[in-house]
Amino acid sequence: MNERISDSIRLIIRRPILRTSIILGIITILVTNHLQITIWKLVDGWSNLLKLGSEALPPDFTVLTERAGWTYPPCTFESDMLCSPAVVGMTQTLEIAFLSTVFGMLISLPLAAMAASNLSPYWISQSVRQILAALRVLPSLIWALIFVIVVGVGPLAGVLAMTMYTIGYLGKLQYEALEGVSKEPLEVARAMGLPRWQVARFFAIPEASNALISQALFMFEYNVRHGSVIGLVGAGGIGWYMNHYLSPFQLYDKVLALIIIMFVVVVLIDQISLQIRKRFMDQEIYPPRALWRNIVPFFPLRGGE
């Protein structure tokens, strides 16, 4: 018996995958027990899920046609559809996402240039990185709670909350992209005696423009998706209207309809942004440099640009 135990221990020691699996299994059991997670709670949850599904199905798409007299800000259109919870809520979500992405991009890009180790002195880059990390510590929902307290209920709180989170999140992506640019153009610029801000403005940022635009489009998609979250605490967007149906009415069929509508809009935005990114990323080995004016349909492409 002792010999079998010794052989088993030696086998475990010789096989790192088996050893790691056993350790992870033991930790999982201990954590599950500490959190008091039991199979009976899962069984109870399944019954609650079935009950929720029976109340939510079929989805009630009257949220697209009925007029919501409790919209904020008040809707002044004569059309009931234009003042419906789905249209007003989704429009506010897109507007909040757009403004927070634009404001966040304008603020985060200079900060990212300061945080890039190849563009700024060590003490500046590390200081700015800590500022960006501090902005990322709080999720967008907590930022929304803070700004609802500061400026009150409404889309302004949502714009401010998503802007703060966008600065922290997008700033990190941007300084990593700037640090990945080729060293040769930067060395040439420094040899010309240009100050650091001109090196960043005329060399580093144009070289990283494809990545920067792709990151901005991703951030816009992210902000649209999180519009449903921040609205639950009163920061505007479609989440505000979901919360109206959830508490105290518990109209899950209407909430499900809003979720489906939001899903369709997010998928459409994802496909549009994918086509925009392909415009710069999928052309031979060396993709053309992205220009902001070229992703806006009102500014036609110029020859050779």
Image (cartoon, helix red, strand yellow):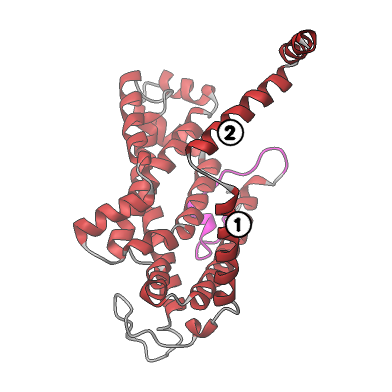
Q: CA distance from mark 1 to mark 2?
A: 20 Å
Q: Residue at x 30, y 75 (%)?
A: 72
Image location of residue 33, percent across then percent down: 52, 37
What numbered label is drawn on residue 141? none
Q: On the image, numbered disc 1 is attached to which residue?
A: 43
- Please indicate, yes or no, whether residue 256 appears anywhere in the rendered image: yes
Q: Residue at x 71, y 38 (%)?
A: 285
Figure check: 185 above or below 3: below
Q: Disc 1 residue type?
A: Val
Quarter of the rendering occupied by the N terminus: top right
Is 29 within the magenta? no
Q: On the image, numbered disc 2 is attached to which residue?
A: 28
Image location of residue 53, percent across then percent down: 59, 71
Image location of residue 267, percent across then percent down: 60, 63
Secondary structure of residue under mark 1: helix
> Which one is in front, 231 or 114?
231
In this image, 176 relative to 3: left or right?
left
- Please indicate, yes or no, whether residue 103 appears anywhere in the rendered image: no
Q: Residue at x 55, y 61 (%)?
A: 300
Magenta-highlighted residues: 284-302
> Which one is in front, 2 or 76?
2
Quarter location, residue 156: bottom left
| In this view, the mark in front (1 or 2) | 1
